């Protein structure tokens, strides 16, 4: 931040400098000065058309990219027979027939799926976050060679494709009597996603001063209490990242719920979409409405926590 | 006497320390490690073990068959085709999603609400389930789907069978994967671009480097970490492609023209019940993912350091 201020005053443009120092992050503020500079150098009349070119091109590319999603959203609110002849038309007036049809299906596919999805997702992300925060803390504070070895074993776990271990997982679950149960699926999710959580938390735990924990211990707090009352609240950004990514992954998961829950226990909404498409191959209205409803929670979640997604992803990208 | 007492006290305190360490471990370390071991490490070990047997739950007894499964794999056309398909799809998406992501990121590398909003647009498919993405594209690309209906109304009498032409279906699949993953690359490249110090650009323009030359010698080297992240992520995504195949093509059209290794493993294990044989495929897949990821990570990280 201070760097930006100094640099801008050097160039003798205090007005611009104050604008760029209002940016939330120093690095962004520096990057933002690039276009300003360029346009300042070129004559005003020439700057207008290339200046417009970029936003127009960007909006155009994004619009083309977004077309498939646009098709879904508009056609959810269109009468079924109108979809194929006029796929791009805006639905005026909109009909909610497709949505009510999905909500009132006689087999309750959507509602049963929704209950399962919420159960599985809520349990999986809560327990995974707690367990991996503790394990991450333990491994970050431990200096033994076993901790190192464990870390390497977990790193390998991040790369294992679920299909590779699915057969033996069903056997392990079967021998525990947990096959075709929500609890079984939740346990599998926890085991599979713990490495991800551990890696996010380790980085953050290393930023928490050890003195803080030792002070709490001297005051008589147990190790567990120190962790939950002192350390865990300081890990909030990591907790947010882990819960958000896990939430999306678990909600969207297909193969594990398909095989582990099986047809008996019902499905999650994601598997429900797959189950439903076989029935009415050409009824795009019903298909889109189910998809729309199943995806709505994820989209709301995404819009609400957008910043965390970007932050969580880009932590490693700027290290160089 | 006193020394005996001291020794006893020392032993007791040592015991106490050990007990405390054990307590901390069982509270903090054990739950995660037990679940990880039970549902990842044990299944991996079982997969490797089964791959050496003729395990089939509906055809006991299970016998140890050594490397027979692996020898059979080497001449199994279905498996080799799945292997080739997986390699092709992975290779395509590594190139297309990286390149598309980079171009879009360069286009969006400005500040303001517009560019933030557009970045979110490109990232949206990343948070969607691959089942949803598959159903969307299936609705668009099936023979009587939205795209071909539109093409017919524009006068194209025989529009391409995007998903029904055996020579085309695999590329269509790669396109769908690219569409879903490109937003990930955009976000990572944008972060990389915004980390390029402005001094570097200034120095380069003083030295007379513009346009392509500046990109080649200033921007691109600074994006090395972003390239590493994207490439590894795309490799892992490509190797494990399953959902899209299951939902869109079910391995077809024809005989396994879009079958991938993951699809082949699940089919063989759950539809064919040839658990031993499927485990051998899974083991090969595991080795492939691990070795390719490690090699690529090493190469790209060495490149980051040297640049």
Image (cartoon, helix red, strand yellow):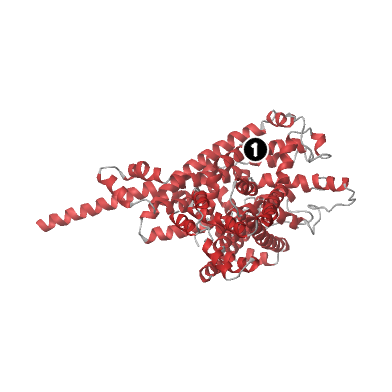
- Identify which residue is drawn at 63% across, 44% down: A258
- Identify which residue is drawn at 67% across, 67% down: B74
Camera-nearest residue between A237 and A154: A237
Q: How far across and how far down the image is residue B161, in percent? A: 82, 52
Residue matched to label 1? A294
Camera-nearest residue between B183 and B46: B183
Q: Is residue B100 above or below residue A275?
A: below
Camera-nearest residue between A187 and A16: A16
Q: How far across and how far down the image is residue B222, in percent? A: 55, 64
Q: Where, by quadrant of the figure, is residue A180 drawn? A: top right
Q: How far across and how far down the image is residue A54, in percent? A: 67, 53
- Identify which residue is drawn at 33% across, 50% down: B22
Q: Is residue A263 above or below residue B98?
A: above
Camera-nearest residue between B101 and A19: A19
Left-right relation of A56 to A7: right
> Label 1: few (<14), some or many (≥20) within 10 Å?
many
Residue found farthest to the left:
B1
The chain identifier of the residue carrying mark 1 reads A
């Amino acid at each position: 931040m201070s760097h930006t201020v100094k640099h801008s005053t050097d160039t003798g443009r205090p007005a611009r400098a104050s604008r760029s120092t209002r940016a939330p992050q120093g690095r962004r503020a520096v990057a933002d000065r690039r276009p300003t500079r360029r346009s300042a150098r070129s004559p005003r009349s020439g700057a207008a058309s290339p200046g417009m070119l970029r936003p127009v091109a960007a909006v155009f590319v994004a619009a083309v990219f977004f077309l498939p999603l646009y098709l879904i959203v508009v056609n959810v609110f269109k009468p079924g027979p109108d979809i194929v002849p006029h796929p791009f038309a805006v639905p005026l007036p909109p009909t909610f027939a497709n949505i009510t049809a999905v909500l009132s299906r006689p087999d309750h596919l959507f509602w049963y799926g929704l209950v399962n999805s919420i159960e599985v997702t809520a349990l999986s992300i809560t327990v995974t976050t707690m367990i991996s925060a503790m394990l991450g803390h333990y491994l970050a504070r431990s200096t033994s060679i076993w901790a190192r070895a464990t870390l390497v074993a977990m790193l390998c776990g991040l790369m294992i494709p679920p299909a590779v271990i699915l057969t033996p997982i069903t056997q392990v679950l079967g021998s525990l009597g947990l096959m075709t149960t929500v609890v079984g699926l939740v346990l599998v999710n926890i085991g599979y996603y713990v490495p991800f959580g551990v890696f996010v938390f380790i980085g953050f735990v290393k930023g928490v001063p050890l003195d803080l924990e030792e002070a709490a211990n001297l005051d008589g707090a147990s190790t567990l209490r120190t962790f939950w009352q002192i350390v865990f609240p300081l890990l909030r950004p990591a907790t947010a990242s882990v819960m958000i990514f896990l939430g999306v992954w678990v909600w969207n998961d297909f193969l594990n719920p398909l095989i582990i829950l099986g047809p008996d226990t019902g499905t999650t909404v994601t598997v429900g979409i797959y189950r439903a498409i076989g029935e009415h191959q050409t009824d795009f209205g019903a298909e889109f409405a189910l998809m729309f409803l199943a995806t709505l929670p994820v989209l709301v979640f995404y819009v609400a926590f957008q910043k965390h997604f970007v932050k969580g992803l880009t932590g490693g990208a700027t290290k160089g | 006497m006193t020394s005996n007492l001291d020794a006893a006290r020392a032993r007791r305190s040592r015991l106490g320390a050990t007990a405390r360490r054990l307590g901390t471990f069982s509270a903090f370390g054990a739950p995660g490690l037990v679940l990880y071991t039970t549902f990842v490490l044990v299944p991996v070990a079982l997969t490797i073990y089964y791959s050496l047997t003729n395990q089939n739950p509906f055809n006991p007894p299970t016998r140890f068959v050594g490397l027979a499964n692996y020898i059979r794999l080497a001449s199994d056309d279905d498996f080799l085709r799945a292997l080739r398909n997986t390699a092709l799809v992975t290779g395509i998406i590594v190139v297309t999603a990286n390149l598309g992501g980079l171009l879009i990121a360069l286009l969006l590398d400005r500040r303001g609400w517009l560019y933030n909003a557009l970045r979110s647009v490109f990232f949206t498919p990343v948070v969607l389930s691959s089942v949803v993405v598959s159903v969307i594209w299936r609705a668009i690309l099936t023979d009587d789907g939205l795209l071909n209906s539109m093409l017919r109304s524009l006068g194209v009498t025989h529009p391409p069978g995007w998903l029904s032409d055996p020579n085309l279906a695999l590329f269509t699949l790669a396109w769908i994967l690219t569409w879903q993953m490109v937003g990930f690359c955009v976000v990572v490249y944008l972060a990389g671009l915004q980390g390029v110090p402005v001094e570097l650009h200034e120095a380069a323009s003083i030295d007379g480097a513009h346009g392509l030359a500046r990109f080649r010698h200033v921007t691109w080297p600074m994006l090395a970490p972003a390239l590493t992240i994207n490439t590894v992520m795309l490799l892992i995504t490509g190797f494990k492609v399953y959902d899209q195949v299951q939902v869109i093509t079910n391995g077809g059209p024809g005989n396994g023209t879009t079958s991938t290794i993951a699809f082949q493993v699940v089919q063989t294990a759950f539809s064919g019940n040839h658990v031993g044989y499927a485990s051998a495929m899974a083991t090969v897949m595991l080795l492939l993912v691990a070795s390719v990821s490690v090699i690529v990570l090493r190469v790209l990280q060495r490149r980051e350091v040297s640049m």
